[in-house]
Image (spheres, rainbow, N blue to C red):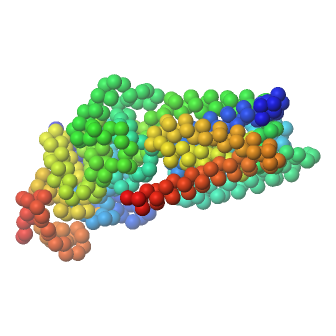
Amino acid sequence: MADEVIRLEDVWVYYDSVPVLESVHLVVEQGDFLGIIGPNGGGKTTLLKVILGLIKPNRGKVLVLGKPPERGRKSIGYVSQTNLFDRDFPINVWEVVLMGLYGKTGMLRRYSAEDKKMAEEALKTANMLNFKERQIGKLSGGEQQRVFIARALVSKPSILLLDEPMASVDPTMQAEFYELLEKLSQEMTIIMVSHDISAVSIYVEEIACLNRQLFYHGSKEISPETLQTTYKCPVQIITHGTVPHRVLKEH
Amino acid sequence: MLDLLQYEFMRNALLAGLLASIACGIIGTYVVVQRIVFISGGISHTAFGGIGLGYLVGINPVLGAVFFTIPSALAMGVISRKTRLPEDTAIGILWAIGMALGIIFIGLAPGYAPDLFSYLFGNILTVPTSDLLLMAALDVFIIIVVLALYKEFLALAFDREFGRVVGVPVEALYLLLLCLIALTVVILIRVVGIVLVIALLTIPAALARQFTYHLKRMMLLSVLFSMAFTFGGLWLSFQLDLASGATIIILAGVVFLAYAGISRSLKKTYAVQR
């Protein structure tokens, strides 16, 4: 049990008496690369926010590294849905990434030389160092996503949470993007949520389906029945070139 | 215009314009990028209640305004975060209550309130030295807070949720920002008046945004634009014998619209040429 990083026990979340999460149980171990798929409105973002302590569950227990999420989230790098920010906001890539160091730097202090070095490293990992002075809204969706990943990585987290990371990434860039994620998964635990089944690639080691309830699978071989229960309608399983080996087994 | 400087009221007017520009350039930038123009409008109108209270109890009405704008800023912030009431509903309610209280207080105050109109629409030519000192003190406070909390306010404005995750106290900072807006409103009342405050909080910053993608430069530029508008508007109001506050706003509005129109048509021409 020593390497258990996230634990959710019987977690219920309601928005106005409408349940969004129903009795979710989830255990994530160190080094896992978990993909959570489910339809829009199925509670995926809510689940991530519960793990981050941004949403308090109405019932149930949440532990991040054995601590309550407000304390455990220091070790989490979070990449939210990027399509939500103001494209005209006057901020450049460098300032966005430094934001990720806030917890380390603290209130009323300036970013130190060491902070700046860490920001540079994170941008290098995400392959975005050359874009450092660019205004964030002027980048393509995929480039923005890389910046937000750099911002999540800069504090050297042990867990990475990604909310719909592929939504704004150009299809031609997705393979490259998965390579980055795979590289990162060598060093940290990753949880990625997506409404897009094809986004769950060869690199994801485990899959869970979420539509208010969480259907957890040990491996990524997922049955059409499970997908149907999750999406409440027949789902066609499609594979394509960028994810050559991801063939989901039929029962 | 230079020979006008021998008059104290003119020197005070220019100084008031300068002090007001510093506050509205810096805070207006946050108002614009964070899209909280309407809440700022609400805060400024509740100031009228404080003006009325000032008349009633016999203190400087501008100082009285502080006692209304700060609590209403906090109330709007708390109501919109902690209750189910939509933010714009909360703003509308407090806005109207503030104005209504102002009218009632003034009605209760003995005698006639002679310069009520100047609080509503500003009169930069009647700023007393005591108000200049108050404005300067508030400016210093605003500058210190923004310098100290620059990266915190940036996180709040750009990505509140991420800020929370990395430990920025976003809720408290948001209330602090609303209080800074409340103080800026008080600084601006003498210059353009309660009703027109919102223009100086938005137009210079919105114009500055057209020229830069750096928040600090945007603040600096909007301070400069705001100075140009207040001084230019003041001079125009002299030449044309018009109300100073309104002339300042009209000048700012015309410049902004003209710039927007020109940059639009330039873009079109450019697109055609390509």
- The picture quadrant where one finds residue A101 is top left
Furthest residue in direction front, as rendered: B273
Q: Is residue A51 left or right of residue B87?
A: left
Check the picture and name the quadrant holding the N terminus of chain A. Answer: top left
Residue B118 place in picture, x, y as percent: 80, 46
Residue A188 place in picture, x, y as percent: 19, 41
Q: Can the viewer see residue A156? A: no
Residue B163 place in picture, x, y as percent: 40, 42
Residue at the spot x=71%, y=55% of the render?
B97
Q: In the figure, A156 relative to B50: above or below?
A: above
Furthest residue in direction bottom, as rendered: A234
- The picture quadrant where one finds residue A240 is bottom left
Is B133 in front, or is B212? Answer: B212
Q: Can the viewer see residue B26? A: yes
Residue B264 place in picture, x, y as percent: 50, 57
Q: In the figure, B36 relative to B22: above or below?
A: below
Is A123 in front, or is B208? Answer: B208
Q: Is residue B242 left or right of residue B206?
A: right
Furthest residue in direction top, as rendered: A113
Is B161 in front, or is A61? Answer: B161
Residue at the spot x=25%, y=44% of the render?
A160
Check the picture and name the quadrant holding the C terminus of chain A. Answer: bottom left
Q: Is residue B271 left or right of residue B188?
A: left
Residue at the spot x=8%, y=63% of the render?
A247
> For the image shown, how many numbered marks are present on the structure?
0
- The picture quadrant where one finds residue A115 is top left
Residue at the spot x=72%, y=32% of the render?
B15
Q: Is residue B251 left or right of residue B268?
A: right
Q: In the figure, A72 relative to B77: above or below?
A: above
